[in-house]
Amino acid sequence: MSENDNHCAEDTEAPATCSCCGGDLFEEKPPLWKQKPIAIIITSATIFAIAIYLEKFLNQGLLAEIAFLAVVAVAGYSIVKGAFKGLSKLRFNMNLLITVATAGAFLIGHGEEGAAVMFLFYVAEFLEDYASERARSSIAALLKLAPETANVIRNGQEMEVHVHSVDLDEIVIVRPGDKIPLDGVVIKGSSAVDQSPITGESMPVTKNEDDDVFAGTINIEGYLEIKVSKKSDETILSRIIELVNESKNKKSKTEAFIDRFATYYTPTVILIAILVAIIPPFLLGMSINDWFYRALVLLVVSCPCALAISTPVSMVSGITSATRNGVLIKGGEYVEEMKNVKAIVFDKTGTLTKGRMEVTEIFALNDNSPADVLWVSASLESYSKHPLAKAILKKAKDDGVKLNDVQDFKSVTGAGLKGNIGGKTFYTGNKKLFKDLNLFKDKETSLKISKLGKNGKTTIIVGNKEGIMGLIVLMDQIRDDALKTVKFLKRNGIKTVMLTGDNEGTARQVASQLGLEEYYYGLLPEDKVKKIDELVASYGHVAMVGDGVNDAPALARANIGIAMGAAGSDVAIETADVALMHDDLHKLEYLVKLSRSTMNVVKQNVVLSILVKSSFAILAVLGFVTLWMAVGIGDMGLSLAVILNALRIGIKN
C-alpha cells in the first residue's frame, strides 16, 4: 500500500489512540480496480502461500523465513513506516502495536504468525476503508449532481461555458433531459422538473415562468430559459454539500465519550501487556516465550479500532441517508438529540397549515347565487394585491368564473373594496365596511360570521347598495400529512405543542382538528422564545419546527431546530439544526425513525466492540488466542461487523 493509499499508516494527525481509525469518512476514493492495495494483497498472499509450502512440505525453514519476511516487507511497508513516524512523536498507534507484535513473533520463532498478523492487518484496513466507502457514496453523488458547464446566451448567441464563469442575471438554456446548472428563476418555458436530489420529493414538480429552480435538479420534458439567481458556489446544492461535510466535526455525546474512553483504554492495555510479559516469567518462573507471545497477542487486541469507528461510521451512514431523502442534518449531535426529544413544538402558519388562504365555503343570501357572490368579489379583488385576493381569484379561476371590468375602483384601507360593475356599485370586505355603509343589519348573518371566526375562519362579505349578497369563507388549510404526523408522534410518546401569533379561535380550531396536546396563541417572536424556555424546563428535550425565517429565534433556542421547506430559503438552512428541504411534514416521522435506528445501531456497535475486545483480552492472557486470530477476528472481523451493521441504516431507511 502506498503512502496515499494507506490513510491508517500515515494519519499522524489522528487521535493518539488509534491511527487506523482516523480516516476521513467523507474522503472520496478511486474505484476498487484502480487501487494499488489489490496488487499488494495478491502479491503478499502468493508469497505467504509459497512460504507455507516451503516450511510445511519441503522443510526449507530458512527459505520460508525469508519468504515470511518478504510478506512483511510487501504488506507492511507503510504500516512499519507509520509506526516509526508515530513513535518519533511519542504516539502509540495501531501501526506500532502491529509492528511490535510482528517483530516479537519472528524473535520467538513464529515467523509464519508474524507474517500473518501483518498481512491480515493490511487486509483488515483495506476492507474497512472499502466498506466505509458506502457511507461516503452519497456525498460523492451530491458532488456529481450539478453539471460543470452551462449553456448561456451571450450577445444573442448560445455558448457552453463553465458554471463558475456564469454571472448573476445571465440567461441559461436547459433542454429536456439536462440537469439545471445553477439556481435561478424560469423566465421562459414550462416543464416537469425532478427535484428529488434536493428536496427528496418522489414526483416531478411542474415549473412555469417565475418559478424557482435549483442546481442539480433534472429538466424532464420541456425547454426552459432560466435567469441565474446564485453563482455556482452559492447554490442550495453547494451549501448542502458544505454543511454535510461540516457535520462530521459536530460529534454526538456518544462519540465524544468513546473518544475519551479510547484515550485511556489503549495505554492501559499496553501496560497490562508489559506486565503479562514480565510477571509470570520473572516472578513465577514460567515460560518466557509462552508469556511473551501472550503479551504480543494482547497488544494486537488492545487497539480500540472497532470501538472508535463504531459511532462515527453509524452517524455518517445516518446523515448521508437523510441527505438522500431530502433531510439535511448538520451533525451527529442532532441525530442523537432527536432520539431524546420528548416534545415537538410546531409553528402554525406554513408548518401545520399550508400558509396560504383558500376558499372553503360560499354562502349566498337574499336570492343571490354562489356564482354571483364569487364573480362580484373576484372582479373587485382582481384590482387588489391583498393576500386574500389571490385565494378568491384562484377559486374563480378553478370554477371557470368570468371576471368583469370594474370602474371607479377604490380600496378602503382596513375595510375592503368598492367599484362599479355594469353600472352598479358593489362592495367586498369586512363587517366594518358594511356597518359604515349601514348595510349590516341582519343579526343572523352577524352571528354566523362570529361563529365562523371562532372556528378559525376568515369571512369576506360581498354586497351592493341594496344589502348583503353573500359570504365567502376562507381558511388556511391544514396540511394533508399533518394529522398523520401528529398521530405518529403521540404514539411514540412525543408531546405535540403549537405556537402561533394567531387568535384563540384559529389556534383552537387547528389544535382540535389535529389533536394537539398543547397550544399557545397571540405570541410575538420573543414570546415564542420564552415559551420554548418554559417547555424545555418542563420536558428537558424539545424540538421546534418552523419555516426558519420569522421563527429563527425559537428554532435557535430549542434543543434542536427543524426548518421546513428549506430548499427555497438560505436563512432556513443556516438557522436550523435540521432542514427538511421540502414542505413535507411526513419527513418528521422519517427523522424520528432514522434517529432511533441510528442510535440503536450505535449502541449495538459499542456493546459488541467492548464485549469482543474484552473477551479477546482475557482469552489472550489465558493463552487461548493466537496472533492471527487476534487480528483476523478481533480486529478485521469486528471492524467489518461494525461497519456492515452501520450500513444497514442507509438500506433500512
Image (cartoon, rainbow, N blue to C red):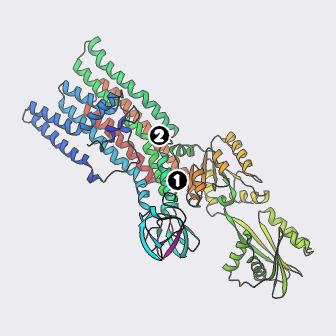
Q: Which is more foreground, mark 1 or mark 2?
A: 1
As for residue 191 lying within the magenta part, the answer is no
Whether the residues at callouts 1 and 2 have beta carbons within 8 Å, the answer is no
Query: Residue 630 lies in what quarter of the image?
Result: top left
Name the residue carrying label 2. 603
Of callouts 1 and 2, the N-terminal one: 1
Name the residue carrying label 1. 328
Residue type beneath disc 1: Leu
Q: Residues within 10 Å of mark 1 (few under 14, many from 20)?
A: many
- Please, what secondary structure does the residue beneath circle 1 have? strand
- Mark yes or no: residue 623 visible: no
Q: Is residue 184 above or below residue 45?
A: below
Q: Magenta residues? A: 219-234
Q: Main secondary structure of the magenta part?
A: loop
What is the number of the mark on residue 168?
none
Which residue shows up at 38% across the image and 28% down it? 266
Q: Is residue 328 above or below residue 638?
A: below
Report the front residue among 523 and 352.
523
Please identify the quadrant where the N terminus is shown. top left
- Where's residue 602, x and y in %? 46, 41
| Direction bottom: furthest residue | 422
- Please, what secondary structure does the residue beneath circle 2 have? helix
Query: Residue 21 lies in what quarter of the image?
Result: top left
Q: Measure the C-alpha gap from mark 1 to mark 2.
A: 23 Å
Which residue shows up at 39% across the image and 53% down it? 137
State left or right for residue 67 relative to residue 519: left
Residue type beneath disc 2: Lys
Q: Is residue 160 above or below residue 580?
A: below
